[in-house]
């Protein structure tokens, strides 16, 4: 870890430096509204992209808790209602079996299990909300190339030579966070050797607001309901096969997905582009260091199968913001070790079981050996039969704030 602050050139002083203006970093900024902090947000993408990010194929499933946090942060009202879809049912299917583990919103006592919102619209709304926070300077089009801390300050060096210092530096710079590494914090990385292709498709039949997770052998297919006769499709496959699937022409791709989905939605047609993401899960050894904290994917980068990544990121950012607010009220130090440690412990307690459980599920449902296939089938049947187990999963899916 680099400890000495750079000495040459002018140093600009803030209360807080945030590296990364993704949805977690921007949500965090908004959560600090009214704290009276001078905040520098450093982001390598240009402002034009932050203000109006292009579609990236991701439709983010949000829990009730996340919807509540986004409302509190005044981000939710900035997302057009017509772009928000409902998930009322969720079905899990093993192989080509017609049997499904079924989660029904009525069993949860809610009108819906969760909502789906395009990632770029979350980012756009979060940027607009963050810009309204007094005392925030967004330094766009710039990367942090070195960073560190000593007992009194944290500092960051930008690629244009600017030097920033603050009492606390927060990394929100993705699961491959360079800033986390610069603060000497290791992370457990799990490379699944797979990629996912995400896209939107239209189809002939109604989806009845049902999300499907189909654990086929060799590939998994998630089909998530969007408004109208449209769905968000996520194909998970060995990384080497991704290029071949991307090279398929649109018609062949549509036929292939409809066939793999057992024609449940009739004929399917691609809408827009297909996007590819490598599947690598990451869990930082600690979410804090000396005058340092990691949030969002920089703390916990999830496999998307259980749709928890951003939900966890939002939750963690809200916890850290609460600690900072409390320090301000006490007129204390926002980078003091006690508050950062409390954030680490609280977030770790929530995130670890979800992270480990998700990886276990991925392991089981990508294991092609006969015992695993049997266990998969047995689990789905048990899940339907055992009401307490189903209700526990339902609570996880909706994740209503206590
Ligand atoms: C296919 C897919 C589907 C998903 N579905 C869901 C879902 O249904 N539900 C859910 O909750 N989550 C889902 N997720 C996860 C979710 O997308 C992520 O958790 C979320 O986007 C992470 O946000 P972030 O702000 O932490 O990181 P990012 O979005 O990665 O943003 C990091 C930012 O930091 C910037 N940056 C990086 N390095 C530097 C540097 N050195 N200097 C300056 N800036 C830097 C980057 O440019 C970027 O803007 C999904 C993910 C994928 C891939």
Image (spheres, helix red, strand yellow):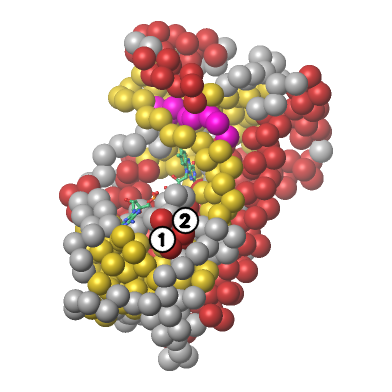
* Residue 19 vs residue 81, the one in the foreground: 19
- Residue at image x 37%, y 29%? 275
Q: Are marks 2 and 1 in contact (CB under 8 Å)?
A: yes
Q: Which residues are magenta?
A: 192-199
Residue 298, numbered circle = 2
Q: How far across and down, in percent of the image, does residue 45 sit? A: 25, 51
> Does 353 sit left or right of 11 as displayed?
right
Instruction: Note whether residue 302 is visible.
Output: yes
Instruction: Calculate the distance from the C-alpha at mark 2 to the C-alpha at mark 1.
Output: 9 Å
Structural crowding at the residue carrying mark 2, measured as other residues with C-alpha within 10 Å and reported as few (<14), some (14–19) or many (≥20): many
The C terminus - image quarter: bottom right
> What is the crowding at mark 1: few (fewer than 14 residues within 10 Å), some, or many (at least 20)?
many
In the displayed structure, 166 sits above or below 198; it is below
* 289 inside magenta stretch: no
Q: Main secondary structure of the magenta part?
A: strand
In this view, the residue in front, 121 or 250, is: 250
Which residue shows up at 57% across the image and 24% down it? 220
Residue at image coords 23%, 60%: 159
Q: Nearer the viewer, mark 2 or mark 1?
A: 1
Observer-nearest of 134 and 69 = 134
């Amino acid at each position: 870890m680099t400890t000495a602050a750079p000495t040459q050139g002018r140093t600009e002083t803030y209360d807080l430096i945030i590296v990364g203006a993704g949805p977690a970093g921007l949500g965090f900024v908004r959560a600090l509204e009214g704290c009276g902090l001078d905040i520098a947000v450093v982001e390598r993408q240009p402002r034009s992209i932050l203000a109006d990010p292009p579609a990236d194929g991701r439709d983010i499933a949000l829990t009730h808790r996340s919807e509540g946090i986004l409302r509190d942060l005044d981000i939710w009202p900035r997302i057009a209602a017509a772009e928000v879809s409902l998930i009322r049912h969720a079905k899990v299917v093993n192989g080509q079996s017609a049997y499904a583990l079924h989660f029904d919103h009525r069993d949860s006592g809610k009108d819906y299990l969760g909502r789906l919102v395009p990632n770029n619209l979350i980012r756009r709304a979060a940027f607009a909300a963050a810009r309204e926070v007094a005392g925030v300077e967004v330094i766009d089009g710039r990367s942090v190339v070195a960073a560190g801390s000593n007992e009194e300050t944290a500092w960051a060096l930008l690629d244009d030579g600017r030097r920033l210092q603050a009492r606390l530096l927060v990394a929100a710079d993705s699961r491959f966070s360079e800033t986390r590494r610069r603060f000497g914090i290791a992370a457990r990385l799990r490379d699944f050797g797979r990629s996912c292709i995400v896209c939107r498709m239209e189809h002939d039949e109604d989806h009845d607001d049902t999300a499907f997770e189909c654990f086929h052998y060799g590939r998994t297919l998630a089909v998530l309901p969007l408004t109208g006769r449209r769905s968000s499709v996520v194909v998970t496959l060995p990384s080497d096969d991704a290029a071949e699937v991307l090279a398929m022409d649109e018609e062949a791709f549509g036929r292939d997905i409809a066939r793999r989905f057992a024609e449940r939605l009739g004929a399917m047609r691609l809408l827009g582009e297909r996007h590819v993401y490598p599947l690598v899960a990451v869990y930082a050894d600690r979410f804090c260091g000396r005058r340092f904290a990691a949030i969002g994917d920089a703390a916990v980068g999830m496999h998307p199968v259980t749709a928890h990544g951003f939900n966890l990121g939002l939750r963690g950012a809200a916890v850290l913001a609460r600690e900072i607010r409390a320090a301000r009220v006490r007129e204390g130090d926002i980078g003091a070790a006690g508050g950062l440690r409390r954030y680490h412990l609280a977030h770790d307690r929530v995130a670890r079981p979800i992270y480990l459980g998700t990886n276990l599920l991925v392991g089981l449902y990508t294991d092609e050996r006969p015992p695993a296939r049997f266990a998969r089938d047995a689990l789905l049947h048990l899940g339907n039969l055992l009401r307490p187990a189903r209700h526990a999963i339902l609570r996880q899916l909706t994740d209503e704030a206590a």
